[in-house]
Every structure is written in structure tokens, then in C-alpha cells.
Image: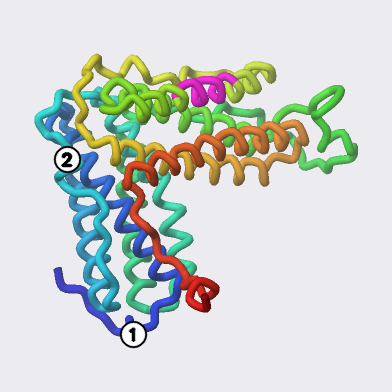
């Protein structure tokens, strides 16, 4: 693939090289996951989206490789055909396929937007700009399919006010004790989004727990399944307490009974830790948007719980030699010894 280059690549910043590295890891993982999906998908709309996303992954991977070569930086290993078993039976339904693809796009979009803002190299700026535009179009297409199939879960509607008003009571911020005010629109949106995200994660980790090849990884996935289930109950409970309609976000019925691993334990562990990372980011965003103190306290507690789970996952990755080392600064103290 030919990529026009105008900027200098000999002195990329730590942010630039790190975002490229993370992009390569994520897209090689995403492409490998889709390769197994494509062996089993039946729905034509979902299959077309998969093919477009696979082409997107391939283009991004090739461009990032090119940038690494220009910068004389070692190309990461990422994920390869060794991490997928194309002959393994289907693990997820077409319905879960399209929902997973949609959630994955939503996961990567804010990361690439942040990467774009961090770039000073003109070629990298243009690369992330074009990547974001292309990904947004794919996300819009997938959302249309989800809506058309009745799968997309919208946020509940709230009444339209007859006039503007201003907050007059400090109790607007309260919530830990005493009476709680109704939820704000943004608070509702974040609760629904995090319930949906956990619902998809719950289904994915349920499937992975069935096919994990080592007891340690299987046990880790089962623990994650319980965490996701409890957190879904928390979000749905808050919505229910405020008489807001709540649709089911549990997708486990879309997981087959297969016990044959379509992916390596390394890839499945990396995918779950990536979902965990996005979950922590999502909770942090929700906490910053929640003006009720009780909601902030709930998100803070959930972040702590998920962070501990993520740390245990990282230890498994390191123990098994599955964690590729990201770009890192020089240890000057070690050199001075």
C-alpha cells in the first residue's frame, strides 16, 4: 500500500509512537477475531459489515507498519493466524456478531480521536483523521442495521419542558442520604450505555469461559462474568428505581454451546483486558458527568473493583509471556548503576 509521507519520522514523540503501537495491537486483534466470525456468519448485512471492517483493519495495519518502517521502529508481533482456529465451531450468533462489531467500533473511536489530538507529525495527523472518518461511517452503518433489526437499545425518553429553569437547591447535588432528585438525561444515557456494554462483555466472557484452554484463564473469565452480571444489576436497578423503562441487556442466549476454542487464550485474555480498560474509561466519563453524589460514589467503587480485576488479568498475561512490552522510557537509574 502506498502512503504519501511529508513529515519526518526520525523523531516521533512518545505519544505518537505509543498510539501507533496500540493501534497495531488493537487492529491485529480485531482482524483475527473477525476471521473466525466470517467462517460462520449467515446474515448478509452483518457479513458485508464484517468484510468492510476486515478491509479497514488490513488498511490500518499496513499503514502503521509503513510508519514503523519509516521510523526504524521494530514492528510489534500483535496477533496472527496462530491465534485463531478457523475450523472451530461458531461461538456466537449473528445477532451478537453485529452487536460486538458495533461495540468494538465505539471502543476504538475515542482512542483514535485522542490519538489525532496528540499527533504533531502531519502524516500521522492525516492518517488518524482519515481513520476516524472511515470508522464513523462504518459505525453509522452498523447502528442502522441494529435499529432495522430491532436490536439497538435506545435511551428512555424524558418529557420536554415548557420553559427554561435554573437549579435553586443544593439538594440537586445530593443523593447519598435522604431524597434523591430525578436522573438527568446524561446520567440516564450513561447508565444505559454502561449496562449495554456490560451486557455484551458478559456474553463474550461467557463464551470464552466455555472454550478457555487453561484452568487459570477459565477461572478468570468466570470471575469476570460474575462482575459484569452484578454491575448490570446495579445500573438496571437505578433506572428501575426511577421508573425508567429498562430493556434486557443480557446476551447469553446468543452464545452457543461450543467448547472448542476459536482463539488462543492469549488473544481472549487480551480482548477481555481491552474491554476492561474501555470500561474504566467509560465509568470515569460517567462519573465526571454525574452531578448526584451517590452516582459518583457508585462509579468510583465500580472503577476500583474493575481495576483490581484488570490487574489480576495483567499478571496472568505476564506470567504466561503473553504481554508484549509497549514503548517505554529508558531506565536512567538502572544505566547509572
Is residue 132 rendered to the left or right of residue 174?
left
Dominant secondary-structure state across the stretch colored magenta: helix
Quarter-of-image position of residue 161 = top right
Residue 94 at what x, y percent from top left? 24, 26
Q: SS of the residue at dot 1?
A: loop
* Residue at 34% in and 58% down: 23
Q: For the residue carrying disc 1, how many other residues have a C-alpha within 10 Å: few (<14), some (14-19), or many (20+)?
A: few
Read off the residue under disc 1: 8
Quick check: 98 above or below 139? above
Residue 230 lies in the magenta stretch: yes
Residue 330 appears in the rendering? yes
Whether residue 60 is situated above or below residue 103 in the rendered picture: below
Q: Residue at x 54, y 46 (%)?
A: 281
Which circle marks residue 166 in the picture? none
**Does 237 sit above or below residue 1?**
above
Q: How far apart are marks 2 and 1 (CA)?
A: 35 Å
Q: Which of 332 and 218 is in front in this view?
A: 332
Q: In this view of the protein, which residue sits in the foreground, 169 or 209?
A: 209
Name the residue: 20% across, 47% down.
54
> Residue under circle 2?
35
Percent x, y of residue 286: 62, 41
Q: Quick one: SS at disc 2?
A: helix
* Closer-to-camera residue (234/315): 315
Q: Give the range drawn in magenta.
A: 225-233
Residue 236 point in image, percent of width and height: 58, 21
Q: Do the residues labelled 2 and 1 touch (CB within 8 Å)?
A: no
Q: Nearer the viewer, residue 13 or 118?
A: 13
- Residue with the most extreme front position: 337
Q: Where is residue 5 drawn, in percent x and y?
A: 26, 80
Quick check: 13 left or right of 56?
right
Upstream in the sequence, badge 2 or badge 1? 1
Horizontal arrangement in the rendering, residue 3 relative to residue 138 (left or right): left
Amino acid at each position: 500500500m502506498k502512503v504519501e509521507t511529508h513529515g519526518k519520522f526520525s523523531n516521533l514523540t512518545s505519544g505518537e509512537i505509543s498510539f501507533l503501537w496500540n493501534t497495531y495491537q488493537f487492529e491485529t486483534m480485531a482482524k483475527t477475531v473477525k476471521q473466525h466470525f466470517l467462517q460462520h456468519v449467515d446474515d448478509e448485512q452483518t457479513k458485508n459489515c464484517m468484510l468492510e471492517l476486515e478491509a479497514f483493519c488490513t488498511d490500518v495495519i499496513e499503514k502503521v507498519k509503513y510508519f514503523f518502517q519509516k521510523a526504524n521502529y521494530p514492528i510489534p508481533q500483535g496477533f496472527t493466524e496462530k491465534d485463531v482456529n478457523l475450523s472451530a465451531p461458531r461461538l456466537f450468533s449473528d445477532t451478537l456478531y453485529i452487536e460486538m462489531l458495533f461495540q468494538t467500533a465505539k471502543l476504538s473511536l475515542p482512542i483514535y480521536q485522542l490519538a489525532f489530538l496528540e499527533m504533531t507529525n502531519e502524516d500521522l495527523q492525516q492518517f488518524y483523521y482519515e481513520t476516524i472518518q472511515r470508522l464513523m461511517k462504518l459505525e453509522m452503518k452498523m447502528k442502522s442495521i441494529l435499529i432495522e433489526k430491532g436490536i439497538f437499545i435506545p435511551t428512555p425518553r424524558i418529557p420536554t419542558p415548557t420553559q427554561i429553569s435554573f437549579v435553586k437547591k443544593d439538594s440537586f447535588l445530593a443523593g447519598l442520604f435522604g431524597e434523591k432528585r430525578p436522573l438527568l438525561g446524561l446520567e440516564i444515557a450513561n447508565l444505559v450505555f454502561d449496562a449495554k456494554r456490560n451486557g455484551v462483555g458478559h456474553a463474550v466472557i461467557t463464551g470464552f469461559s466455555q472454550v478457555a484452554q487453561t484452568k487459570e484463564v477459565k477461572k478468570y473469565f468466570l470471575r469476570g462474568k460474575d462482575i459484569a452480571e452484578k454491575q448490570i444489576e446495579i445500573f438496571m436497578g437505578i433506572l428501575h428505581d426511577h421508573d425508567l423503562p429498562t430493556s434486557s441487556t443480557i446476551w447469553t442466549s446468543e452464545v452457543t454451546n461450543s467448547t472448542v476454542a476459536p482463539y488462543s487464550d492469549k488473544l481472549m485474555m487480551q480482548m477481555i483486558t481491552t474491554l476492561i480498560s474501555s470500561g474504566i474509561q467509560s465509568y470515569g466519563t460517567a462519573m465526571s458527568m454525574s452531578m448526584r453524589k451517590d452516582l459518583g460514589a457508585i462509579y468510583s467503587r465500580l472503577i476500583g473493583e474493575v481495576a483490581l480485576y484488570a490487574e489480576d488479568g495483567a499478571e496472568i498475561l505476564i506470567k504466561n509471556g503473553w504481554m508484549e512490552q509497549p514503548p517505554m522510557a529508558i531506565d536512567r537509574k538502572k544505566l547509572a548503576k
